[in-house]
Image (tube, rainbow, N blue to C red):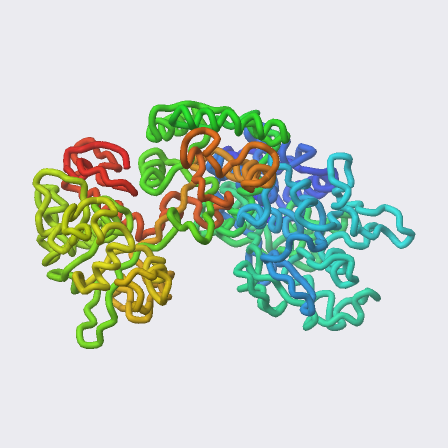
């Protein structure tokens, strides 16, 4: 269970007070103190009993002790809350150095991957053990594969796996399924005890649980399978086992041979560490008390009837750590797993304050709060009203509210200005990609004139409309950000009209709108309503901009990735589209290449992000996702039979209230933990292009040029402040 530790050292060198977490550790510490004393080593070492790591940590905080050995969760807390830095690490062997690896093992004959673990039987080394519990549970939560309502991790695990053996999870507060696969001793007694009487306890026991077919996956360390196969173990159960019959589950969904643990693991678990003053004190002593014939052995606990006292028994030496911060020492994989485990039911608020911005949203939010309460979903929802999304962001920044649902440009503002982070996102139906799609630059396939995105100056352009996301904001924003389009006097439409030789950019009527932006437009069948931002202009919106390209009016059309498929290969029966083939068109990639229209995931200007629930970084994203994931089981389906519908606003006389009506699920953020990761670099580039530095003014409002989804002509003026 020891994955990592730390020694907190006081600055005073007159006496070093080492806090022991058990009676056995106290006994070893006293012997170490005597050995140091006999050798005339100063400062003297005094041992005190804390009883537990948590008590020792508090004693150090209260200046009643100077040193203690801690595991990974506590080193995370010590670094995060107290700013403590590791300077010395334990080395276990020369092959892996100051770490070992937590792995997930399955039989090679199974079809199990990391993505199909739900519903299988699981074998764990023990409750709260690092490789057997902390890392796999933390990883499953952090990656969004497992949701824990109310941060109740044991219950979440019991519902995720069909049955388990988690030695030590036999108390009254644990679900019975966590001990269901355990075996007990030879007489069938002591089932699920966290000691060697339970035959499925510890690393070899968890592997035995898998090998004997009790469970289908075992969470152990990288050396467990080699140590118990191919004749290396004397135990009768392991005699016939071959390492080649087992494989590892990788984080990316692949599997790998059991020897490939360096590249296929759940997390690298760092060694225990020591902090400043004791480094010079201990580093000089390790050789003196670690050799053959010495009375006291620093790295051996056998004489005390226990393991890993003060130092891990497998330690071969102590080494200096060069990068002295706890995040670097823990590593991203382990750090994220531990952060997920910090989701603690005892520290959760009674309720989450949800920020809404309209009368209709307040109405829907109130109904949501009542519906959630009826199903005993936790934490409870309380609705907080604000005048604008920006006001919601400010309230959350001040911790006067907890959550708000935001779209693209608002997510940028929330993250960049207010420091908020995404806690969960929306997923939309396959036939409604209005909020999660790719903005692309579409051209005709032309072997004699295969121009690229860098050759757009002087070309004729087709746009869905002024201020539209895929047709204007993203392409023009990116071209400005990259310096391809130059802005003068903050007049973006004028700059665009000077860049392209002619365009069709349908717009609501406005003064001083460059005539070249309407030059390619054709109006309705009678030639009226030319350049109108409505269906009366035949080149308006996605299909219109594509028609502008297809009829050779323009050289490039800025649309979404699905536009070409919706209007070719017989999908659109209108006369202008009836004979069009999708294979006659290509995409312009940002890197200067061309690609086929089917390659939009690799070749696009930007991916338009889904809405996200944004929270203060101190809010537990795992608690919020745990609540919403459980809620959508009852209220996510439009025909759920439970009354309230999360993704339907019709009962509240509105559209897209709180959540988008086209959403089909709330999804975890996964690796996209920040606003920038959620939005993507291309989308951010387009946003920042539309708010060029010379136009942002002293107010530094991020949202000045963020014209999202609707046409608001005045927003293109430099001095305007407003929302999308």
Check the image and report above or below for 654 versus 140. Answer: above
Indicate the quadrant where residue 178 lies: top right
Q: Residue at x 48, y 31 (%)?
A: 651
Q: Quadrant of the C terminus?
A: top left
Q: Residue at x 68, y 37 (%)?
A: 21
Check the image and report above or below for 607 versus 611. Answer: below
Q: Residue at x 65, y 42 (%)?
A: 156
Question: Where residue 250 sits in the image (x, y, percent)?
Answer: 57, 61
Question: Where residue 449 sits in the image (x, y, percent)?
Answer: 17, 73
Q: Is residue 63 visible?
A: no
Question: Where residue 437 sits in the image (x, y, percent)?
Answer: 37, 53
Residue farthest along the front direction in this orientation? 526
User: Which residue occupies the foreground of this view, 646 or 668?
Assistant: 646
Residue farthest along the bottom direction in this orientation? 448
Q: Is residue 659 visible?
A: yes
Indicate the quadrant where residue 422 lies: top left
**In-image side of 136 versus 702 (left or right):** right
User: Which residue occupies the foreground of this view, 51 or 45?
Assistant: 51
**In-image side of 339 versus 572 (left or right):** right
Check the image and report above or below for 339 versus 583. Answer: above
Question: Where residue 211 sits in the image (x, y, percent)?
Answer: 76, 63
Indicate the quadrant where residue 627 lies: top right
Q: Residue at x 22, y 47 (%)?
A: 536
User: Which residue occupies the foreground of this view, 222 or 105?
Assistant: 105
**In-image side of 373 versus 360 (left or right):** right
**In-image side of 499 versus 340 (left or right):** left
Residue farthest along the right direction in this orientation? 187
Check the image and report above or below for 623 versus 115. Answer: above
């Amino acid at each position: 269970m020891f994955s990592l530790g730390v020694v907190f050292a006081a600055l005073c060198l007159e006496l070093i007070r080492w806090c022991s977490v058990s009676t056995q550790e106290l006994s070893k510490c006293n012997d170490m103190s005597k050995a140091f004393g006999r050798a005339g080593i100063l400062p003297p070492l005094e041992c005190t009993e804390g009883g537990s790591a948590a008590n020792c940590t508090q004693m150090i905080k209260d200046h009643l002790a100077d040193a203690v050995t801690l595991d990974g969760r506590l080193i995370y807390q010590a670094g995060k809350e107290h700013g403590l830095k590791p300077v010395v690490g334990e080395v276990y062997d020369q092959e892996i150095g100051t770490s070992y690896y937590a792995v997930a093992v399955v039989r090679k004959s199974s079809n199990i991957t990391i993505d199909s673990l739900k519903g299988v039987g699981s074998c764990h080394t023990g409750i709260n053990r690092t490789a057997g519990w902390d890392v796999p549970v933390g990883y499953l939560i952090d990656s969004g594969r497992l949701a824990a309502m109310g941060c109740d991790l044991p219950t979440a695990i019991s519902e995720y796996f069909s049955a388990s053996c988690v030695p030590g999870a036999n108390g009254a507060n644990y679900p019975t399924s966590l001990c269901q696969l355990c075996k007990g001793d030879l007489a069938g007694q002591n089932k699920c005890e966290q000691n060697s009487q339970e035959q499925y306890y510890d690393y070899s026991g968890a592997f035995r649980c898998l090998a004997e077919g009790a469970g289908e996956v075992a969470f152990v360390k990288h050396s467990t399978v080699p140590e118990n196969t191919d004749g290396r173990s004397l135990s009768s159960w392991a005699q016939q086992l071959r390492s080649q019959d087992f494989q590892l589950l990788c984080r990316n969904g692949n599997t790998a041979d059991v020897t490939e643990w360096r590249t296929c693991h759940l997390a690298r678990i760092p060694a225990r560490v020591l902090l400043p003053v004791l480094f010079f004190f201990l580093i000089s002593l390790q050789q003196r008390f670690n050799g053959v014939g010495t009375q006291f052995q620093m790295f051996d606990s056998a004489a005390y009837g226990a393991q890993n006292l003060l130092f891990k028994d497998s330690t071969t030496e102590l080494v200096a750590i060069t990068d002295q911060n706890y995040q670097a020492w823990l590593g991203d994989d382990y750090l994220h797993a531990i952060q997920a485990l910090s989701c603690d039911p005892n520290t959760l608020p009674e309720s989450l304050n949800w920020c809404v911005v309209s009368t209709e949203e307040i109405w829907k939010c109130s109904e949501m709060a009542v519906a959630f309460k009826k199903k005993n979903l936790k934490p409870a929802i309380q609705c907080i009203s604000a005048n604008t999304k920006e006001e919601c962001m400010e309230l959350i920044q001040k911790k006067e509210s907890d959550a708000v649902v935001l779209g693209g440009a608002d997510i940028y503002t929330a993250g960049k200005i207010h420091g908020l982070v995404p806690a969960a996102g929306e997923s939309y139906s396959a036939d409604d990609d209005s909020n999660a799609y790719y903005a692309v630059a579409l051209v005709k396939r032309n072997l004699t004139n295969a121009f690229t995105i860098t050759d757009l100056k002087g070309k004729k352009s087709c746009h869905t409309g002024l201020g539209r996301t895929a047709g204007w904001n993203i392409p023009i924003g990116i071209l400005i950000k990259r310096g391809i389009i130059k802005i003068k006097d903050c007049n973006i439409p004028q700059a665009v009209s000077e860049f392209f030789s002619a365009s069709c950019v349908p717009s609501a009527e406005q003064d001083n709108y460059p005539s070249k932006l309407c030059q390619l437009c054709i109006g309705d069948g009678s030639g009226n309503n030319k350049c109108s931002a409505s269906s009366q202009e035949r080149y308006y919106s996605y299909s219109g901009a594509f028609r502008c390209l297809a009829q050779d009016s323009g050289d490039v059309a800025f649309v979404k990735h699905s536009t070409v498929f919706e209007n070719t290969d017989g999908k659109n029966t209108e006369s202008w589209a009836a004979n069009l083939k999708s294979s006659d068109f290509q995409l312009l990639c940002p890197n200067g290449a061309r690609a086929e229209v089917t390659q939009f995931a690799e070749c696009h200007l930007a991916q338009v992000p889904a809405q996200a629930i944004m929270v203060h970084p101190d809010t537990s994203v795992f608690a919020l996702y745990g609540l919403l994931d459980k809620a959508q089981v009852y209220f996510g389906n439009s025909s759920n039979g439970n009354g309230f519908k999360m993704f339907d606003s019709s009962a509240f006389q509105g559209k897209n209230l709180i959540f988008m009506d086209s959403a089909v699920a709330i999804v975890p953020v996964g690796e996209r933990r920040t606003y920038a990761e959620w939005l993507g670099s291309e989308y951010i580039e387009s946003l920042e292009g539309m708010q060029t530095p010379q136009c942002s003014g002293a107010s530094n409002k991020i949202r000045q040029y963020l014209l999202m989804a609707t046409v608001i002509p005045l927003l293109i003026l430099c001095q305007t402040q407003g929302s999308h």
